[in-house]
Amino acid sequence: MIRTLLSFFIVMLVLCCAIYPFTLNEIAKFVFPYEASGSLIDENGQATLDVNKAVGSELLGQAFNKPYFLHGRSSAVNYNTSDINQSSVNSGGFNYAMSNPALKERMIKDLNQFLKQNPNVSKKEIPIDLLSASASGFDPHISKQAAWIQIPRIVKFSKLSKNQVEKIINNSTQDKFLGIFGEMKVNVLKANIAINKAMKKSKNATTNTRTNS
């Protein structure tokens, strides 16, 4: 009896922990190669399967602090870029209760920081997603309104025109699911890749103009 149970345990262990996940992973790579590889994006904003060419994943948020970039939501794990332990891989939210004073302190801190970075914006204009944190700490999106109120700051520091930035944000906006569920959202990484490309193009154009003059 014990031998039979042990044999069954070993067979199921190999089947469920090795053969089954390996088979599903290989099928997924064949049917959905981009998604199975992590939905990676290169520096041109194009899908890539090469990890060495990837600058990020369209499904995972990153910390952007430069004033000419679009800024994402607050993250309890700092988008896993903590200076304390670079080797750690963490995911999660603050999990503060509404009655927890730390929640109010954290939101006030984020509010004041955003107002300092965006002096043209009033408190009433700031959407809730910029003051709240996602459950995972890796939300790659912000609302259309959250992106729109950052345009003046991005224009000022990137030296791009308002029309250029608005077009970039519109091109990086995803519609509601099936057109009715959820809200329109902006992929922060895709928008910042486009901003970076536009800045490089503008800089090269200026350099060529000075050279030819």
Image: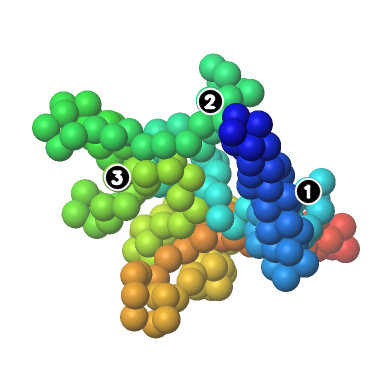
Q: Quadrant of the C terminus?
A: bottom right
Q: What amino acid is at disc 2?
A: Ser
The residue singled out by tag 1 in the image is: 51
* Among numbered discs 1 and 3, the one appearing first in the sequence: 1
Residue 98 x %, y %: 15, 37
Residue at 82% of width from left, 46% of height from top?
A: 52
Q: What amino acid is at disc 1?
A: Val
Residue at 40% of width from left, 75% of height from top?
A: 176
Q: CA distance from mark 1 to mark 3?
A: 32 Å
The residue singled out by tag 2 in the image is: 82
Residue at 37% of width from left, 62% of height from top?
A: 143
Give the label, 2 or 1, closer to the camera.
1
Secondary element type, mark 1: loop
Residue that protrudes farthest toward the left in the picture? 99
Q: What amino acid is at disc 3?
A: Leu
| Front one among 57 and 186 | 57
- How crowded pointer 2 is (Cα within 10 Å; few <14, some 14-19, many 20+) is rated as few
